Image (tube, coloured by chain):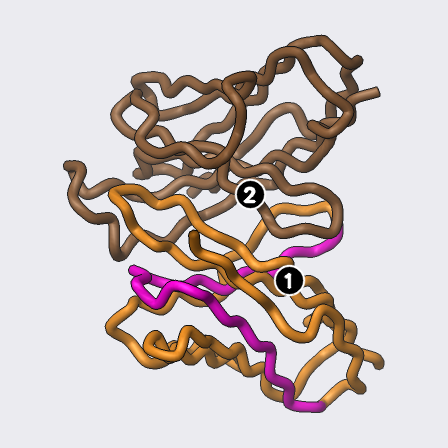
Amino acid sequence: DAGVTQSPTHLIKTRGQQVTLRCSPKSGHDTVSWYQQALGQGPQFIFQYYEEEERQRGNFPDRFSGHQFPNYSSELNVNALLLGDSALYLCASSSGTGGRRSPSSREQYFGPGTRLTVT
Amino acid sequence: KQEVTQIPAALSVPEGENLVLNCSFTDSAIYNLQWFRQDPGKGLTSLLLIQSSQREQTSGRLNASLDKSSGRSTLYIAASQPGDSATYLCAVNSGGGADGLTFGKGTHLIIQP
């Protein structure tokens, strides 16, 4: 049973560039969340996708955008990169309930992350 | 706004000791709480999930408790081993129609052989 996968593993970009990170959820999961983890900090929630729509968003600027595809995989796009965007980007997946009711019981499973370095 | 605090920030103990990691959160209206383990430069491995209606969960040498009314959770590790060395993260799901987790900064644990 494949777990959550992310690509690429590492990425180096220059300030002002744009980047796209990819995530495939665990088999049977339909909800994908993205987190940013700076060095020495806990992960910070960016946004979550369910049924191909952004369902919840954390305190991140519009430079951060995403997409979810019909096969439940997801992309995170960051425009106009800043040095402060250097971080480990984590994707998490969970099993949906078939609707939008309270997701009280869903355990989240994380991928290995993408290390982004902005120079 | 939910805030999660983990104490201590770092801990170093000899192999074989039992130890307790602490997590506190400011808003007691949570749906669940998860404990994770993170090895350096790696992703997160889920250890235990406690629903808001539960008091504790156990998995092998790990036991997590939840006191929602006081905004506290503890992770108990029995008979620690060098392989337990990692950063342990606590995260709460405050609901709101989605699963965005709020994390603490973690406890960096070193088990000395």
Chain drawn brown, letter?
Answer: A
C-alpha span from label 1 to label 2: 13 Å
Magenta segment range? Answer: B17-40
B83, above or below A69, in the image: below
Going 58% across and 51% down the picture, which residue do you hit? B44
Q: Chain of mark 2?
A: A
Three-letter code for the amino acid on which mark 2 is drawn: Gln
Rendering coords of residue B2 (x, y %) = 44, 56
Rendering coords of residue A118 (x, y %) = 78, 22
Q: Is residue B19 magenta?
A: yes
Report helix, strand or loop for mark 2: strand
Chain drawn orange, letter?
Answer: B
Q: Chain of mark 1?
A: B
Rendering coords of residue A2 (x, y %) = 46, 39
Position of A22 compared to A25: left or right?
A: right
Camera-side residue: A80 or B110? Answer: A80
Going 47% across and 81% down the picture, which residue do you hit? B63
Q: Quadrant of the N terminus of chain A?
A: top left
Residue A79, located in which quarter of the rendered image?
A: top right
Going 57% across and 77% down the picture, which residue do you hit? B22
Q: Residue at the top extreme? A: A17
Going 29% across and 68% down the picture, which residue do you hit? B52
Q: Which residue is mark 2?
A: A44
Q: Which residue is mark 1?
A: B106
Rendering coords of residue A84 (x, y %) = 73, 29
Position of A102 compared to B65: left or right?
A: left
